[in-house]
Amino acid sequence: METLPDLLGDSLNILSIGLNPSLPSVKAGFYFANPRNRFWKALNACDYFESPLTPSLESCEQMRDQYHIGFTDLVKRPTAGCKDLNALDYRTGSERLRELIQQLKPRMIWFHGKLTCQKYVQYGCEEKHPIDWGMQTWEIGSTPVFITPNPSTANAAFSLDVITDSYNMLFQQLAKPTAC
């Protein structure tokens, strides 16, 4: 199966988790490659990055190397849409993701969309948790969890401004000092 490889590093500040790779992203070889996806526009509207990021593998690598933001997906099987995913995809993906989080120990987990987080909790957590936007009241292991709207154009209920605001809130949480 051709898919997007994880883009990870040591000492991750954030582990960015999408639902699954889109077909355009697999073809282009980088995350959020669909030109209609609002991820890159929302990131560039934030005050967090020193210079604009272009939709490219180079920008994904810069985010990993300079900002310590890694990329993965709950399900690694690419599809045209979430309707093509099934329980086995979510179960297998949740197990893989749980192991990845335990191994990497990022400072924060960033789910793109409630569906991504809901499926992880449903198939990968012993305890069920309430899921809302923003910082969650629960953690995965000892890692805080943050949920932003999925930037896909299939999620048109959220404007670019709302997505950008949620990214700004995420990065503000990251800037808060950690407890000793």
Image (cartoon, rainbow, N blue to C red):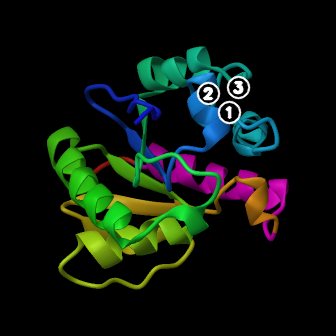
- Asked whether residue 173 is drawn in magenta, I would say yes
Residues tagged 3 and 1 counted as in contact (Cβ below 8 A): yes
User: Relative to the observer, which residue lies in front, 20 or 87?
Assistant: 87
Q: Which residue is mark 2?
A: 27
Residue 179 numbered tag: none
Residue furthest front in the image: 1
Q: Which residue is mark 3?
A: 55
Q: Residue at x 44, y 48 (%)?
A: 77
Q: Residues within 10 Å of mark 3 (few under 14, many from 20)?
A: some
Apparent side of residue 179 relative to residue 131 in the rendered image (left or right): left
Per the model, the C-alpha gap separating discs 1 and 2 is 9 Å
Q: Nearer the viewer, mark 1 or mark 2?
A: 2
Residues tagged 3 and 2 counted as in contact (Cβ below 8 A): no
Apparent side of residue 126 relative to residue 30 in the rendered image (left or right): left
Q: Nearer the viewer, mark 3 or mark 1?
A: 1
User: Relative to the observer, which residue lies in front, 16 or 23?
Assistant: 23
Q: From which residue to which does the magenta span run?
A: 157-176
Q: Amino acid at mark 2?
A: Lys
Q: Residue at x 29, y 61 (%)?
A: 94
Answer yes or no: is residue 86 visible: yes
Apparent side of residue 6 relative to residue 175 in the rendered image (left or right): left
Q: Amino acid at mark 3?
A: Pro
Q: Which residue is mark 1?
A: 33
Q: Nearer the viewer, mark 3 or mark 2?
A: 2
